[in-house]
Image (tube, rainbow, N blue to C red):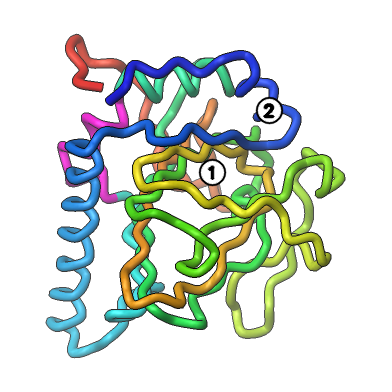
């Protein structure tokens, strides 16, 4: 991986627009590792569906879309990748210290017109008061409008840098934080890039209309543990402690 330090322009854009992009950050070896981990996670979900005699598992649907939550808990290579100097310096500059790993997940989309996510803030899924946290989104395949990339609505267009109320559809689907007509900024970047955005930045994604899978890996870092309304921990709250030697 390139020795990459974010600069003042990127930091300012994060605070002014809610996001910034680093193109082609991760080398081929790193990208292949993440793809392998994603494929392993998908295969594990397929095996679980087989055992249950079902074609769905939670939010995942066989050969349609897959959500793999907190894969780093059981995968040492992902932990080595996450707890690195690279992500430490990003977190330190954007949210300060301490830094906690709050969440990580793989999302894979196959051709499916239903694999759309409405405009929302990640913070819109947290029902307790919390400080905005940081999302590091890595496309594992080249992403564009046709295969269902994300779009982000800059703060200047959203009109806020704060968490806003989200509606919940009657069918219990995705929470919705924006219903306006602004299309936002379409994120079209090559695999191995990094999109860094705040948990209060509104974003959405479209359907994958191609015959190839569209995979992404994301990690979320917070400056404090985050809790559910019943007081139990939401996600993880792993302190960011750098190992003596880090590959990244």
Decide which of tag 1 and tag 2 comes sooner along the chain: 2
* Quadrant assignment, res 94: top right
Residue under the point 33% across and 77% down: 211
Q: Position of residue 98 (x, y in %)?
A: 49, 18
* Quadrant assignment, res 130: top right
Is residue 127 visible to us here? no
Residue under the point 37% across and 63% down: 214
Structural distance between the alpha carbons of marks 1 and 2: 29 Å
Q: Position of residue 200 (x, y in %)?
A: 68, 43
Marker count (numbered): 2
**What element does badge 2 sit on?**
helix
Above or below residue 127? Residue 47 is below
For the residues bearing labels 1 and 2, Cβ distance under 8 angstroms: no
The residue most toward the top is 244
Q: Position of residue 247 (x, y in %)?
A: 19, 21
Q: Quadrant of the N terminus?
A: top left
Q: Which residue is mark 2?
A: 13
Predominant SS along the magenta part: helix
Q: Which residues are magenta?
A: 71-83
15 relative position to 89: left or right: right
Above or below residue 231? Residue 177 is below
The residue most toward the right is 159
Q: Which residue is mark 1?
A: 227
């Amino acid at each position: 991986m390139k020795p990459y330090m974010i600069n003042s322009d990127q930091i300012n854009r994060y605070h002014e627009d809610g996001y910034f992009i680093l193109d082609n950050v991760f080398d081929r070896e790193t990208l292949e590792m993440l793809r392998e981990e994603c494929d392993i996670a998908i295969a594990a979900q397929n095996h679980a569906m087989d055992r249950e005699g079902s074609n769905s598992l939670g939010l995942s649907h066989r050969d349609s879309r897959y959500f793999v939550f907190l894969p780093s808990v059981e995968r040492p290579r992902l932990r080595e990748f996450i707890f690195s100097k690279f992500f430490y310096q990003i977190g330190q500059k954007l949210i300060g210290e301490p830094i906690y790993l709050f969440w990580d997940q793989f999302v894979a989309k196959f051709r499916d017109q239903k694999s759309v996510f409405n405009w929302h803030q990640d913070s819109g899924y947290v029902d307790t008061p919390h400080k905005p946290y940081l999302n590091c989104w890595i496309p594992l395949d080249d992403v564009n409008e046709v295969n269902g990339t994300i779009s982000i609505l800059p703060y200047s267009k959203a009109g806020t840098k704060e968490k806003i109320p989200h509606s919940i559809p009657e069918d219990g689907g995705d929470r919705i934080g924006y219903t306006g007509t602004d299309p936002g900024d379409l994120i079209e970047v090559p695999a191995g890039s990094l999109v860094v955005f705040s948990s209060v930045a509104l974003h959405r994604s479209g359907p994958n209309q191609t015959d190839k899978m569209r995979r992404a890996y994301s990690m979320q870092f917070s400056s404090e543990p985050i809790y559910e309304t019943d007081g139990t921990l939401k996600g993880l709250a792993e302190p960011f402690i750098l190992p003596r030697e880090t590959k990244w």
